[in-house]
Amino acid sequence: MADVVVGCLPASTDFAVRVADAWLAELPGCVLAVVHTDDRRTVFRTRAEEVLWERGPGCAQLCEVCAYPWLVAGYRLAELSGPVDSRADVRSC
């Protein structure tokens, strides 16, 4: 099982959130789902929170590389610098 799943879809942000939720539901060992959208945003989704970032040049790959170790160290995604929109969506597992 993968700890992190990353995808790039020509889709809206709302659809990207649904895709990330589906990946987390289908892959119980997955910790982080990352979906890039066609509107230069990236959805980072865990089972406890969702964070949306605007993408700049080179940001997408850097953010993916940094997000997983950040979570493993015990921090929340919302604590990473640069979020445009941060929504806590705490759900029971």
Image (cartoon, grey):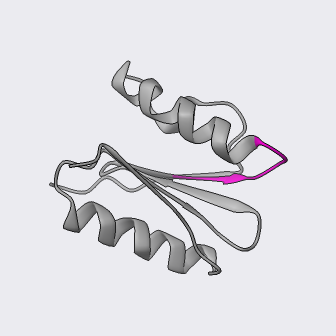
Q: Give coordinates of residue 28: x percent, y percent.
A: 16, 55
Label total for image: 0
Horizontal side of 62 relative to 57 (left or right) equals left
Q: Give coordinates of residue 19: x percent, y percent.
A: 42, 73
Q: Is residue 55 magenta?
A: yes
Q: Give coordinates of residue 17: x percent, y percent.
A: 48, 70
Q: Quadrant of the C terminus?
A: bottom left
Residue furthest right as drawn: 57
Magenta-tinted stretch: 51-58
Snapshot quadrant of residue 64:
top right
Q: Residue at x 36, y 49 (%)?
A: 46
Q: Residue at x 78, y 42 (%)?
A: 58
Q: Is residue 61 magenta?
A: no
Horizontal side of 59 relative to 63 (left or right) equals right
Q: Give coordinates of residue 92: x percent, y percent.
A: 17, 55
Q: Residue at x 55, y 77 (%)?
A: 14
